[in-house]
Amino acid sequence: MEARALVERWQRGRASVGPDGRVVLSAARGLGLVSKVRRAYDWIAERVLQVPYEDLEFGPPQVLGRGRLKVQVHQGGGWCSFLLLPLLTLLTRQRLLIVGGPGRGKTSVATLMALLAGISPEEVRRSIQRGHPQLTVADLLGAPLPSELIKAQDTREVRVAWRRWISLPVKVVDEYNRIPTKTQSALLSLMAEGYAELFEQVQHAGPSSWFLTANDDLGGGTFEVIEALRDRIDMVVRCPPYNGRLLEALVEKASRAHGGEPNVPRDLVLTPEELERASEEVLALAVPPEVTDALGFFAGQLDFCARAAERVEFMNKDTLHLSGRRLAQVCNEDCPLDKQEHLCTQSENGVSARAYQSLLRYAKALAWFRRKASVGVEEVRALLPWALHDKLRPNPQSAFFQKPEHHVYLTDRVAWIHQLFDRALTQRAFYAPTRAPVLKLTLKVEKALDAADDNTLRARLTELEAQLSRLLEQGELSAPLHDDVLALRRLHARCRRRLEARQSEDS
Amino acid sequence: MTVIPFPTLYENALQVGAQQHARFAREHYLACAKDPGEALYAAIGDASLVGGYLALVAEAVGLEYLRGPEDGAASLLGWGLLRAAPTLLPRAPAARRTHLLAMLWNLGEAVLREPAWINSYATAMVHAVDDLEKLPEHLVATLDPVLRPRPVSRWQGPFTVEVLDPRALVEDFLPGPMHLAAPTVVCVHDRRREGSQMGVLVPAEGGRRLVGPVPCLGTAHREPAVPTVSVDARGLQVEGRSVALPFLAAPHQSLAALGGFVVASAVDSQRLWVVNAP
C-alpha cells in the first residue's frame, strides 16, 4: 500500500460540501439483506413490542430443573415466533394468521410489516381491511363507477374503481373471522388465485404477503371461516400473553403524539427490489433429501389408518372421513397397533401437500435468516407446529391421550406437534435398516425403467415382488411399512405398464 | 438575523438520526454531541456548520461508530468529531471549516474499513496535529514508513538490538502473547490484563516505536516460512547465529517476521527487545 494514494482515497468519502455551503452526507453503504432483516427483528423485539420469550430455539438443549419444573436452554440462540414468522412471511410472500386476545399486538405487528415494506404510515392505515359483519364485496374489492353503470351497454364497459389495498405488496386483514361468508369467498379468490373479479374485469393482487388476524384461535368469530379460506393460510402464530415488560412498550406508545406505530427507521425499510432479491435468495436455498425424507416419513404417519380400508392404497384417514366416520370409531382395541408407539392414532386427520409446501418455503426463509446454506431438519421442526396449528386435529379419544402425562398435549398444540415430529424421527431411525433395501431397490428399478430390456424389467418385477413379500412378513402393517409397501406397489405397476407397452408396440 | 438556540440544532439532528437508524441510541448521542457541540457553537456561532456537525455525530451514533466521549481516543473518526472538531475547527479560516469537517468525516470513516491496526496507529499518532489542513499530510508521513514493505531478510546480519519500554505509555503493562498485525506491525497483549495491548512498529528505515494502549490490532496478517528462532539466556538464536540480548535473563515470548526482525519479551521484565536483521 502506498500511503499517499491511500490517504487521497480516504478523502473521497461520502461527506462533501453542498451548493449551499453545508456539509452533505450521501447514503451509507447498505447492510447485507440478512443483516438488515435481523436488525429489523432486533429493533421490533427490543424497542417496539418487547417480546417476553424466544420460542424458536436452536442448537443442543441443556435441561435445567427437574420434573414439571424443567426448562431447556439452547446453545444456538432463539427468536420469538410472534415476530419472526411475520418477517419470514414478508420474505416468502405467504399468508400468516395472527391469533390472540384483544390488545396483544396482532394488528401492530402486521402494520409494522407493511411499514418495513416501505408503505407509508398513512397508506397502511387506509389499507387495513377491518372485518365486520356488514363488510360487503364492494367494501372489500371496489365498486363500479356509478356514471358508467348508467351509460354502459355491456358489463365489460363498466369500469370498476378497485380498492387500492388490492395491489399493495403487504395486505392486512384484521379480524377476518368477522367477515360475512359471501365476502370471505371474494377474499378467498384474491388470496388463493391472486386476482379479484368484478363485472368481468380482473384486478391482480401482485406478489404479496398476507397478514390476517383473529381474536379466537379456533377461527370462531362472528362468522364461521370457510374451510377453503382457512386452508389457504400458510402459518398461524400466537400472540405472546401479557407480560410485565410489555408495559414499557405501552408507556412508550402512549407517549407518542399519534399513539400509533413508531416510524420505522429508514435503514430498516426494504425496497421492492430488496424484497424481490430476498425472496429469490430464499427460494434458491436447497432442501436436502434427508430433510424431505424426514418430513415425508412424518406426513405418512399422520395420514395412515390401517382400519380405514381393506386395500393398502386406501388405508388413510380421508377414506374414513369420506365414509362419514371418525378415527375414534376404528382406532380402538381391534386395531393391533400399539397406541403409545404409533403416531397414526394421535391425529384425526392427515395434512394436505399444500401445507408441507408452505412449511418448506418458511423453512427456507428461516435457514436464510440463520445464514445457513440449506434447510435442516431443525428449521422444519421449529416451524412445524405453526404450519399445522390449525390444520392438524388431535384424536382426543386415542389411548395415547388417556395417559396423565399426555393430557397436556390436548391443550398445548405446539408441544404436541413437536412430540409427534420427534417420535417420527426416532421411528425413522429405528426403521432405517428395514427401509434401506427398499430404497436401494427403488433406485435400482427407477434407473432401469427407461433403458431396460424386457428380460431386465421382468427380473426387476420379480425382485419387487420378493421385497414386498419380505416386508409383509415382518408383522402388522404400520405407517412406515405402509409407506414402503405403497412405494414398491407403485413401482411394480410402472414396470408392468412399461412391459405391456413394449409388448403392444412389438405386436 | 434570528439566532437558533443550540438545543434546537441538537434536537433536529437527534430526530434525523432516530428516523434514519434502527440502532440510534439517544443516550449515546447525548454523551457524544452535547458538550463538543455546545463548545463548537460557542466558539464559532455558525448554526449551519454546527447543524452539519451534529448531523455527522448523529450518523456516527446511528451506525454505532460512537457511543461516548471515550471514543475520542478509540478511532480516528472519534478523535475527529469529538476532539478535533470542537478545538481545531474554530482555529481554521471560516471559509474552510465545512470542507475540513467533511474531510474529518471522510478520513475517519474510511479508516474504519481498513485493518484494525491502521485505525489504532493513526489514532495514536494524530494527537500531534494542531492544524486540520495538515492532517492528510500528517497521515501520509506517519503511515508511509509502516506501510512500506520490508524486503525478505536472509538473516545474515548485521544485527541491531533495541530495547523498548512500554512503561512510558502504560505504567504496569507486562508483555504477553504477541502476533503480527501487518508486515511491520506487532500487537503485544498484556499478560495480566485482558483487552490491553501495545503496538510495536518496525519500519524498514528504523525508528522502532511503541504505540498504545490500543485495541487488539488484528490477526489478519499471516506469514509463511518464518525462520525458527529461540531465545535463551545467551540471547537470540536464529539461522545458526546468536545475538546477545542485554538484560534478558529469562525469556518469555518471541516472534519473528519475514522482513527480518524479532520481538522478544522476558518473564521478569516489562521491556521488549527488538532485533533487526535487514
Image (tube, coloured by chain):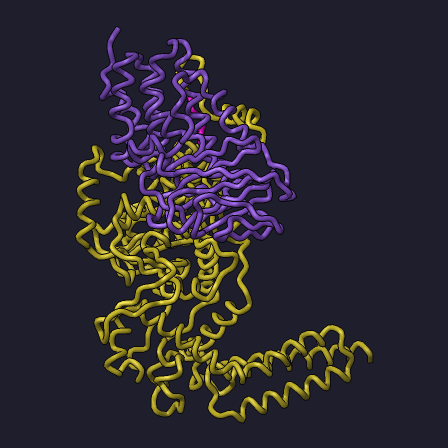
Chain colours: A yellow, B purple
Compare residues B175 and A67 and report the one nearer the observer.
B175
The answer to whether residue B97 shows anywhere in this view is yes
Residue located at (25% from left, 24% from top) = B35
Query: Quick one: quadrant of the N terminus of chain A?
Result: top right
B275 is higher (above) or lower (below) than A433: above
A308 part of magenta stretch: no
Residue located at (57% from left, 48% from top) = B242
Residue located at (39% from left, 90% from top) = A335
B25 is higher (above) or lower (below) than A501: above
Compare residues B162 and B179 and report the one nearer the observer.
B162
Whole-percent x, y for residue B277 in the image: 59, 40
Considering every residue shown, the one lying at the far top of the view is: B1
Residue located at (35% from left, 22% from top) = B84
Whole-percent x, y for residue B202 in the image: 52, 36
Tell me the magenta residue range: A24-29
Whole-percent x, y for residue B238 in the image: 58, 49
Q: Is residue A243 left or right of residue B240?
A: left
The answer to whether residue A123 shows anywhere in this view is no
Q: Is residue B35 left or right of residue B210?
A: left
